[in-house]
Image (cartoon, rainbow, N blue to C red):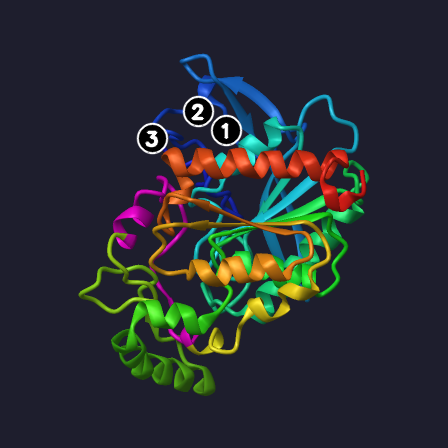
Amino acid sequence: MADATAGSARPFRPWPRMPFRGKPWPNGLCLRRLHPARRSASWDDGSEMIVPDRFEFSFRGETCRGDVYLPQREDKPPAVIMAHGLSFDRTLGLAAYAERFCREGFAVFVFDYRGFGDSDGQPRRLVDPTRQLEDWAAAIAYVRDRADIDPARIALWGTSFAGGHVVKTAAAGQPVAAIIAQVPFLDIFSTLKKLGLRQVLRAVPHVLRDAAAALLGARPHEVRVIGTPDEFAVINTRGSRDTVLRLVPPGSPWENRCPARILAKILLYRPLAAAARVTCPALLIYGEHDNIIDAGRVRQAAAAVPSGRALPIPAGHFDVYQGEPLTRALDAECRFLQEVFSGRHPATGA
């Protein structure tokens, strides 16, 4: 199949003419700048497909890009802003969440941070909590300024590392109606305990080498994001590599590498400490078999939020993007959002 981005000054990924769910786009649709933002078509089996449009916003001269899903027959719907965790981009497993939320009547904005996916920014794939929190704030400002969205009903959805980001963002006083933190990174020390001392010691030379490269203005020293237990990677817990690689669709720009300085940048990042300052309703979902995130820290964070709730599901850290764990998480999240957006959640005063 010919490359749909050939000759384009700004390649559009991952959506141009490419298989999705193992099937070609129906009727030869090329998903480039379709209007209105929510277009529907049918797969061969008759099921509806939601076609997202693109959106973008800028911060400090750099542009973040993403996909927007707008529901039909909704005037100024509530919105959910979504982003991925760690060094992943929006092509890895987020479309299923966005489509379901859109069918529930929510506008959905899924974006990539600067340095990730098709967003601007250098160095590429650098995980920097401060920088990513800036992108969250810019995304909220963009969505609030849209005339077709209800600015009083905006929720944040973050998974893994981004789960911590939505806690920090809400705690900073951003005007959001609710947050969903899924398998959230909240405390580096409990995570390091799960990963083990050997993993920490193996990281030191990589961090020092990349720090030196940054000081000298040289090319970053990169390490694997996901690996097997017998190799060094940011995450090398058993089963993680194979589970993540199954999420990567054809044509995805994601690469399994990132600058090693991530391991230093996250040492002082502890969203758990900010949880008590979250004033909006919060749903925190954790996997009962998660070998990366400490379930006790998730329960602790939920207890600290005045309107917080912790919900366990029988899953590992990377299982929540497919199969039964995906269904369980989505069902709970949709119920929570419907309650918040309709005013039926106890914290809304209805």
| Element type at mark 3 | loop
**Chain-order first, disc 2 or disc 1:** 2
Q: Nearer the viewer, mark 2 or mark 3?
A: 2
**Tags 1 and 3 in contact by the CB under 8 Å rule?**
no
**Chain-order first, disc 1 or disc 3:** 3
Q: Where residue 1 is drawn, which disc sits there?
A: 3
Say which quarter of the image contains residue 225. Answer: bottom left
> Where in the figure is residue 289, as x and y percent of width and height?
34, 51
Q: Real-space Cα distance between discs 2 and 1?
A: 7 Å
**Chain-order first, disc 2 or disc 3:** 3
Q: Real-space Cα distance between discs 1 and 3?
A: 13 Å
**Tags 2 and 1 in contact by the CB under 8 Å rule?**
yes
Residue drawn at point x = 21 percent, y = 66 percent: 231
Callout 3, which amino acid? Met
First to last magenta residue range: 240-263
Foreground pick, 315 / 30: 315
- On the image, numbered disc 2 is attached to which residue? 25
Quadrant assignment for the N terminus: top left
Q: Would residue 235 be found to the left or right of residue 127 on screen?
A: left
